[in-house]
Amino acid sequence: MRFDPALAAQIAFQEAETELGPDWETAVELEDTFSSNAGATAREAYESLLALSARHPNARAFHAFCIYITWQQATEETIAHHFETGLRLCETYLAALDRQTGPDAGQIEELHGSFRAGLGLEEEDEFQAEFKKDTPKGGD
């Protein structure tokens, strides 16, 4: 990865203050709980942060923050659920790029690829696609 997701999460979180309005204080409390705990307490705070992001569909920085912390979750607990969640969040974020762009777009695209790879959904490169096309099939 060409960037530090933890640092990117901190930056995105600070940028989200204006996006969340009255929910900002709740987000601060949840983020503090998430980052200073482990286990079930951190997981509950993480899930609450994701639920908060669902209530703010246009909060680009906050959505980026949620993607970054999902990557942190995936690296700490490598289960399919985290990779699936990350993939879904990235796809939602990237689909919205048609309407607006954000400073995190390149990093989110990189994480999108990492979530896909974690699920075994790696995209074929040009060489692999050409190889498959040229490989004889049964009956050839």
Image (cartoon, rainbow, N blue to C red):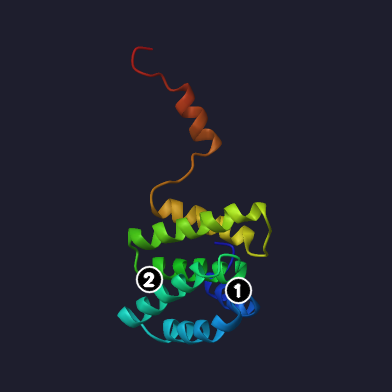
Residue displayed at 64% across by 55% down: 97
Q: Is residue 31 left or right of residue 77?
A: right
Quarter in which the C terminus is drawn: top left
Q: Secondary structure at mark 2?
A: helix
Q: Residue at x 50, y 84 (%)?
A: 26
Is 130 displayed left or right of 80 in the figure? right
- In this picture, is 60 found above or below 36? above
Q: Is residue 22 left or right of residue 48?
A: right
The residue at which mark 2 appears reads as: 76
**Observer-nearest residue: 124 or 26?**
26
134 over 125 or under it: above or below: above
Image vertical order of residue 63 relative to residue 37, above or below? above
Residue found 49% across the figure and 43% down from its top: 123
* Tag 1 secondary structure: helix
The front one of 21 and 108 is 21
- Name which residue type carries label 1: Ala
Q: Which mark is residue 138?
A: none
Marks counted in the figure total 2
**Neighbours of disc 1 within 10 Å: few (<14), some (14-19), many (20+):** many
Q: Sequence-wise, which precedes: disc 2 or disc 1?
A: 1
Residue 62, x across and y down, in percent: 57, 72
x, y percent for residue 16: 61, 76
Q: Quadrant of residue 100?
A: bottom right
Q: Position of residue 11 (x, y in %)?
A: 61, 76
Q: Residues within 10 Å of mark 2 (few under 14, many from 20)?
A: few
How many angstroms separate mark 2 from mark 1 (CA)?
A: 20 Å
* Circle 2: residue type: Glu
Mark closer to the observer (2, 1): 1
Q: Which mark is residue 12?
A: 1
